[in-house]
Image (cartoon, helix red, strand yellow):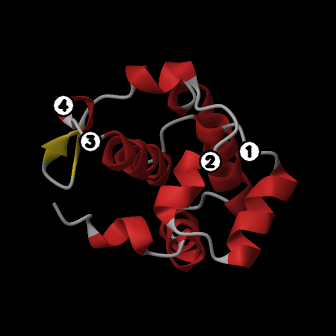
Amino acid sequence: MTKPKIYSMSFAKVYPLYIKKVEKKGRTKEEVDSIIRWLTGYSQEQLENHIDKETDFETFFEEAPELNSSRRLITGVICGVRVEEIEEPTMQEIRYMDKLIDELAKGKPMEKILR
């Protein structure tokens, strides 16, 4: 089976889109970084290194130091699919991140986003 294109897409190419999306709604890059660090366990320096190296999404999640166990509490629909029902692990991790960024852009408080 062919892997979805997003797996080989550079995280560094999507990252600025996350920031642009939330800044249009009055949120910040720092909040985006906080969400990503919470989800993946990366330090700020590690996150920036992956951006600089243009790591692909699959590698970005494979190398995550410690995926947050509370991420399983993330529910809802993203791209027309319920995130809790996605069976492929890497795709589910990507959609978890998308869902958290969406919640930030919609004005949800950080303490609720970071379950």
Instruction: In the rendered structure, find residue 36 and report the number of the disc placed on it.
Output: 2
Q: Nearer the viewer, mark 2 or mark 1?
A: 1
Extreme residue in the right direction: 45
Could you tell me the amino acid type at mark 4?
Answer: Glu
Which residue is under mark 1? 42
**CB under 8 Å between discs 1 and 4:** no
Residue 74 x/y as whole percent = 38, 28
CA distance for labels 1 and 3:
22 Å
- Nearest to N terminus: mark 1 or mark 4: 1
Question: Is residue 65 toward the left or the right of residue 101 in the image?
Answer: right
Which residue is under mark 4? 85
Could you tell me the amino acid type at mark 2?
Answer: Ile
Label 2 element class? helix
Could you tell me the amino acid type at mark 1?
Answer: Tyr
Image label count: 4
Label 3 element class? loop
Q: Nearer the viewer, mark 1 or mark 3?
A: 3
Residue 87 x/y as whole percent = 21, 35
Label 1 element class? loop
Quadrant of res 82 = top left
Extreme residue in the front direction: 1
Q: Work out whether residue 17 or residue 46 is closer to the camera in this orientation and state it.
A: 46
- Other-residue count near label 2 (Cα within 10 Å), few / some / many at <14 / 14–19 / ≥20: some
Q: Residue at x 54, y 49 (%)?
A: 61
Could you tell me the amino acid type at mark 3?
Answer: Glu
Residue 41 x/y as whole percent = 70, 37
**CB under 8 Å between discs 2 and 1:** yes
CA distance for labels 2 and 4:
21 Å
CA distance for labels 2 and 3:
20 Å
CA distance for labels 2 and 1:
8 Å
